[in-house]
Structure formats: C-alpha cells, structure tokens
Image: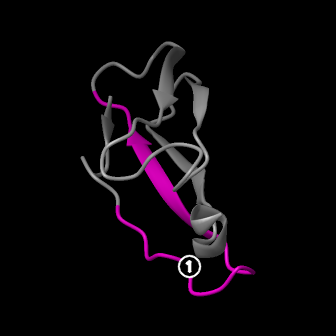
Amino acid sequence: MSLSSRQYSIPEPVSAADIVSVSIDLNRYGDTGDMAQVRLSTRDSSAVSGIDYGATSTNVRFESGTVKFQSTRVLQLTANARRG
C-alpha cells in the first residue's frame, strides 16, 4: 500500500464561509487476489488537528481485485475558526 503523495497541501480558506478539502489516493500493489484492509489516519505536522483541520481515521477496505481507493476528504477549518 502507498499514498499517492507523502505530503498534502491545501490553501488556507479566504473567508469564514469557505471550507477546503483534499482528496487522498491510496494505491494497492502486489497480490490483489484477496481482500485487504488498512487504517488511514491524519497526523499533526505544521497543521494541528482541531485548530487547522478536522482529524480523520478510517478503515480502508480493498475488495479482491481492487487497486485504488480514492477521495478520503480531510476538511480544513475556516481561517476565522482558527483565530477563534
């Protein structure tokens, strides 16, 4: 398994009404003959969960023959919400 990118960046929202999201692709390699399941979670770095973005943790299930999982969305809070 691998993410399509090691790092994701999204623009900061301009107004309080703006919510920005990012799509994350997870790719499966090797034997795809059986079902496989992995956990996909966010982790703080330059952005902080609950302040800069909404944390996500989900199980991703690949059915037999499936090689790509798409569109887990990590929502970023508005600029005004961060300034509180």
Identify residue type, mark 1: Pro
Residue 72 as seen in the image, left or right of residue 65: right
Q: Quadrant of the C terminus?
A: bottom right
Residue placed most toward the observer, 83 or 51: 83
Please name the residue shown 59% across and 24% down the image.
63
Please name the residue shown 71% across and 79% down the image.
16
Asked if residue 78 is among those painted magenta in the image, a careful observer would answer no
Residue, disc 1: 13
Please name the residue shown 60% across and 53% down the image.
73
**How far from the left and from the top, in percent, is residue 82?**
58, 63
Residue placed most toward the observer, 7 or 29: 7
Asked if residue 27 is among those painted magenta in the image, a careful observer would answer yes
Magenta stretch bounds: 9-29
Please name the residue shown 52% across and 17% down the image.
37
**Residue ranking furthest to the right:** 17
Does dot 1 land on a helix, a strand or a loop?
loop
